[in-house]
Image (cartoon, rainbow, N blue to C red):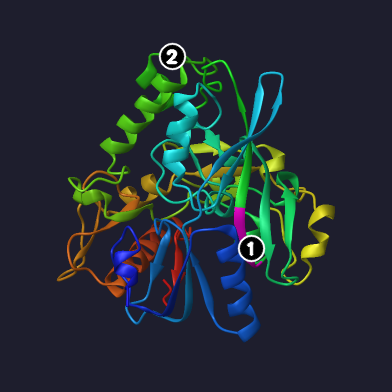
Amino acid sequence: MTAFSELTTTRVGGEARELVHATTVEQLTSAAHDVWDDGENWLVVGGGSNLIVSDDGFDGTAILVRTSGIERIGVEGDDVILRVQAGESWDGFVAQTVAAGLGGVEALSGIPGSVGAAPVQNIGAYGQELSDTLVAIDFLDYLTGETTRIPAADLGLGYRMSAMKQGRRGIVLAVEVRLKRGGQSAPIAYAQLARELGAEAGDTRPVAAVREAVLRLRASKGMVLSESDPDSVSTGSFFTNPIVSARFAATLPADAPRWSLEPEAADTVIPLDRPDLLQQLKPATPTDARVKLSAAWMIERSGITRGFALPGSRAAISSKHTLAIVNTGGATAVEIAELGRYVQTRVMGEFGVLLQPEPVLVGLSL
């Protein structure tokens, strides 16, 4: 039986009781219905880049999504709409869009994992988020057993957040995105990327140049999967950047990095037992301005340095970036979680902020 240590980028985790490979939508749908009808525990596995499973494994069925296919389904002026099957590699998809001269996801280059996982996390990097270009998803709903097309506006998308992550159970079968023809990037919105490109904020550049710049930046932080880079044996960023009230942010040191959020960036609350209400949901009106903080800065200021490890542990903070926890060789899921918990405790003690893990944790917690 295949262990999760062979299916995830952190290379930890025991075996699933049963493992099902689905290479077509029909196989994926059938496997899900079989598991759901039997009332078994189930877990969807894509690229395994945002998943940490306990050393005891998973007492249920793991469904490996290995579907493939990219289809052009519409052209509206300069816009091209693509439908991408959930099992496609995210970065492989981005590479194809760049090669075709399509703009809109180039700054999301180098993000590991599958296309199906992208809307669950609302992946984002270097000033872009999937929500910028997402049109809709094809979703196999656990409650109804039916496949439905859900517009992006009804997915409760926010910073590393979606209705699926908040509790709407099911499987993403395919993703639709709207990209721009012409070979130019979306306006560059991230200062570090702009500097790398010799550009100003708001400028555009050829999509290929932006992809190359993003890959360079990610590689410098150990955030591009590579057999030659031990710092890439991780889930990437282990913690999300915390979002707090402006009043709380004002109590932090003046040099703490912070970014003001627009009102529509406020959290959306998804009723877990009423997915039928999704179409009626609007982003909550904040009672106070929201500010995003830098988790990496807080970790460093709490005294945790690059390369730090607990005594005797084979899990360590990346030597390139304090936001990543890496398996230095033979680490266990318990060791990964212990280090994550230690980081949480240090940051909470120093700043009063509880960092939230970004990867999905199965069978263990911080």
> Relative to the observer, which residue lies in front, 196 or 80?
80
Q: For this view, does 231 lie left or right of residue 74?
A: left
Gap in Å between the C-alphas at discs 1 and 2? 37 Å
Q: For this view, does 231 lie left or right of residue 298?
A: left
Secondary structure of residue under mark 1: helix
Q: Main secondary structure of the magenta part?
A: strand
- Coordinates of residue 8 in the picture (x, y in percent): 35, 62
Q: Quadrant of residue 343?
A: bottom left
Label 1 amino acid?
Gln
On residue 199, which mark appears?
A: 2
**Circle 2 crowding by C-alpha within 10 Å: few under 14, some 14–19, many from 20:** some
Q: For this view, does 304 lie left or right of residue 94?
A: left
The residue that disc 1 covers is: 166
Give the residue displayed 34% in from the left and 70% down from the top: 4
Which residues, given as a range, are shown in magenta?
169-173
Q: Decide: is 59 above or below 144.
A: below
> Relative to the observer, which residue lies in front, 241 or 16?
16
Label 2 amino acid?
Ala
Q: Decide: is 327 above or below 31.
A: above
